[in-house]
Each structure stands twice: as structure tokens, then as C-alpha cells.
Amino acid sequence: MKLLVCPLNGPRNVDEFQYLGPLRDMPDPNAFTDAEWARYLFRAENRPGTMLEWWRHRPSNYVFVAERHTVTDRVLRTFDSAELEVRR
Amino acid sequence: MVFRLLKYGLSRDYPVTGDLPATPALQRSYDMVIIGAGGHGLACAHYLSKYHGIRNVAVVEKGWLAGGNTARNTTTIRSNYITPEGIAFYKEGVALYETMSQELDFNVMFSQRGQLTLAHTEATLRSFHLRAETGRHMGIGIEVVDQKGVEALCPHLNMDYGGALEVLGGLWHPDGGTARHDAVAWGYAAQAARRGVEIHQRTEVTGIEVTRGRVQAVVTNRGRIAAGQVMIACGGMNYDMALKAGVELPIRCYPLQAMVTQPVKPWLHTLVSSVSLHTYLVQSSRGEVVIGGGSDPYQLYSTRSTLDMKEHLAEGAVHLFPFLRNLRLLRQWAGITDMTPDYSPIMGESPVTGLWLDCGWGTWGFKATPVAGKRMAECIATGQVPNLLKPFALDRFERFALLNEMGATAASH
């Protein structure tokens, strides 16, 4: 993977991006156990396969979501995080 | 000489014995199944069979013997870590390497030539003082050296006086060294096999059966194996393997890339590493300069290499030793490292009874091969986690008792 399609800036060299890790759901901050909080902090998605993850375009400081396959390294799609809200 | 060769070559009786027996038929049950025939799994099998009398052991391996991260690491052996718990553990690892060739009756070519870590900034130098004091307190050989000291230890080094990456000093660790990685694995495998341990190559674990919180069996492509005890030691696939037993490990996988140059005469007499350049070098016993180690910047299960990462490694190496620019690269590769949040391994019990973990070895596993094998064997044989391993328990994350070793390596992560 050399190019990543930024939803804001179009296709850019992957060197311009920062990887921010897989998406994860935060437990309800008003009601969680220590174990749930530890799990949220330390256990990230790591299965071989497709994964939703946060990326940032450094020069424009724009954060978006990419769906990528962690074995083939193929990016299936990238989209603005607003779409996540819509899907929920 | 010629006649003797002919005589032995044509003789039917001349005893030619391989070190390793061929993969035997799979039995229906074993006392113990070790998943992964890398250095760690084989070392555990050796210590179980030699010191604890547990010989009804099967080591199952998806690929071939020691073909994963044991073959892909950059063979650095050292104990100059940050936390006292980490130093105590790796110190025992170094001590076991010192006597390994005798223990295994197999020359692992351990070369204790010392490791020099370079500081290009004041901040790095300050962190070296902390590491040196902690290390001395824990009884390892470690000291901070100034520019003259660095020059004396490594006269070929580009000090870059007045430059942006001027070497301000170094962390000298005379206990550090290197060994032949294949020999380590083969030595343990040969010893274990001699005592009855079965090594099953090309045997992929497809499932782990757990009933009422206790491990019952592993399912492989060659059939089901009932087992009272199972240890997971399969490097980059540890996360995926533990999931098969319903255990979720705090691990993320990143490829680590390395490469070697063509062989040249011996000139680099220490291991050299630079934290700022994310580059470390060692000259192997074959004369090749091993250059590591760049971690890919995002999670991946692929062992392909990338040009940008190799360029980065080459840039660091050529900066430290400018004459390397005339050398050609001979091989390059990547291995999948199972990184933990605190850069320390996960050893000992899992939430499943009878399922043992030797996981989270990230970029730091080779040096721990003997100590992890020895102590995990003790752990499994006695059912008691040795004090040396207790700080590395999986539940440390729930207790927020992390062992931060980030920055104890020059690998770029």
C-alpha cells in the first residue's frame, strides 16, 4: 500500500498519514467495572481480516475511518467519521 | 582422507543419525501439547523432559521447525532493560546462554561481545543513567560511557561531531551478545527428541477444546489430540491461537523488518544500536551485517517487506557506518511481532485451567528463549508460577500493574 485515499484530500502517499488504531466502543463512563475499563484500554481488535480503524492525514489534521484487510493490506474503503454516526 | 570418505560413503553400517527424527504418527493423547515449534516451545519441551520427567509431550508446528520468528529475529541477547522485574528475568536469560552450548551439547555460537547503545540527545543520555543505575542495582554489567569511551569501543563509528546526530555518549552493556538462532532451536529440539518428545511439523492447530473452564484437547489438521496441559507459544499467531480457546490477549500484531548485507571480514566487534535512528547492527559469525529493526506503522499479518522501511534501515546503518554504502544487501525479511501494551511478555496462567501462555514476545523474544522455556517448564510441572514470572501474568493489565519496557530497544515502535 503506497497510496491511501483520504476522504478530504483524495489519494495521498501513505507517509502523510498517521495510524491511530482500530475503532473500539468505549464503555459507559458512568457505569463500568475495572475489568471492563482495562479491556477498553488494553485489548484492541487484532483478528486477521477486515478491520475498521482510525487514520489521520497529518498535514490537514483530518481524522477519518478506513476499512482495511490486515492480511492482504488492501484498503477496502475510507470514509468520514460522520458516517459512523449515521450507521449507528 | 579420500579413501576414508569412500569407505564411509559406501558402507551400509556407518551410523548416520540425524539430530531430529522425522515427524512421527500422531497419537490420540499426550500429557502436554506445546503449540509452536520455535525456540520457546522447544526450550520448554527440553526443560520439561530433562528436569521434570515429563516426556509424553507433543510439540505441534504449522510450518517447519523454527521457521517463524526464531528464524526472523536479529539475535540480540542482553538484559539492559528498564524495570527491575524485566532485568531480573532477562539476566537469567543471558546466564543460561552462557552455558547453553554445554547444556545442549550443541554449539550455539554464543558470542558475548557486548552491546553499545548510542545517545544522540541529552534526553537519551539521561535515560541511560537511569537504566545504568537500575541495572547495576540488579547486578548486571552496565555503564554509561562518554564520547571517548564510545570511540574506544567502536572505532569505526561515525561520531558526527558537530552534526545533527552527534554521538554524545553510550550505554555499554558488556553482558550483551549474539548466538546462532537456528542452532538454539535445533539444540533444544535434538535434546527434547532424544528424551522422547515428539515434534510434529506441518501440523496446524485449528481449534482448542475447552469444557467447563478446562482445556481438553487441541484439534489439528491431522486429527484431535487430547491433552491435560497445553502451552501457546506460536509467536505472531498467539492472539489468534488464544482466541480459539476463548482467551482474548492484549496483543496487536505488527511486522518487524530486517535485512543482512553480503558477508565481509570481521570488523564490528560489538552490537551497536541507536534509539534515535531506530537502527541496530550486529555482524554475524558468517560476516554478514544484520540490520534491524523497523516496525511497520500499522497492524498487519503480512510478512512482506516494504521499500520505505528498508530505506529507513539502510539510512540509519549508513549514517552510523558510512563505508557500509558500498555493501550490497543479501537478504531481507519481516516477521510478525505480537506486541503488548507495555512491551513486556505475557507468561503463566490463562483464564482456562491447563492452558498456559508464553506470549507477547513482540520484538524481544529470542534473548528470552532459554529462560522462558526453563521457567514455563517449572510452572507447568509444578503448577506454581515461579516468582520470576509472576510480574508477567496476564491479569497485570486488569490490575493496572504494567511493566513498561518501551524505549528499552532501538526497534522502531
Image: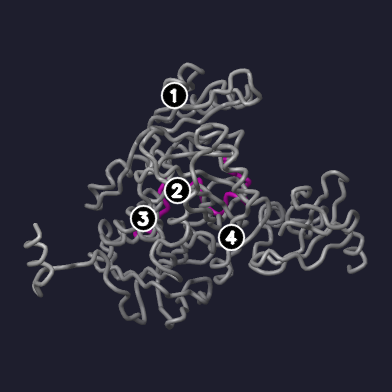
Disc 2 residue type (three-letter): Leu
Callout 4: few (<14), some (14-19), or many (20+) C-alpha neighbours within 10 Å? some
Range of the magenta residues? B381-405
Q: Which label is found at residue B182?
A: 3
Q: Chain of mark 1?
A: B
- Cα–Cα span, label 1 and label 3: 31 Å
Q: Label 4 sits on what residue type?
A: Arg
Same-chain check, marks 2 and 1:
yes
Q: CA distance from mark 4 to mark 1?
A: 35 Å
Q: Secondary structure at mark 4?
A: loop
Q: Position of residue B114 (x, y in %)?
A: 39, 32
Q: Quadrant of residue B277?
A: top right
Q: Nearer the viewer, mark 4 or mark 3?
A: 4
Q: Is residue B316 above or below residue B42?
A: above
Q: Up-down: is B66 above or below B120?
A: below
The answer to whether any part of residue B309 appears in the image is yes
Give the residue pinned by disc 2.
B389
Scheme by which the image is coloured: one colour
Nearest to N terminus: mark 3 or mark 2: 3
Residue A16, placed above or below residue B277: below
Q: Nearer the viewer, residue B171 or B194?
A: B171
Find disc 1 in the rendering and name its residue: B155
Mark 2–mark 1 distance (CA, rounded to whole Å): 39 Å
Marks 3 and 2 sit apart, C-alpha to C-alpha, by 26 Å
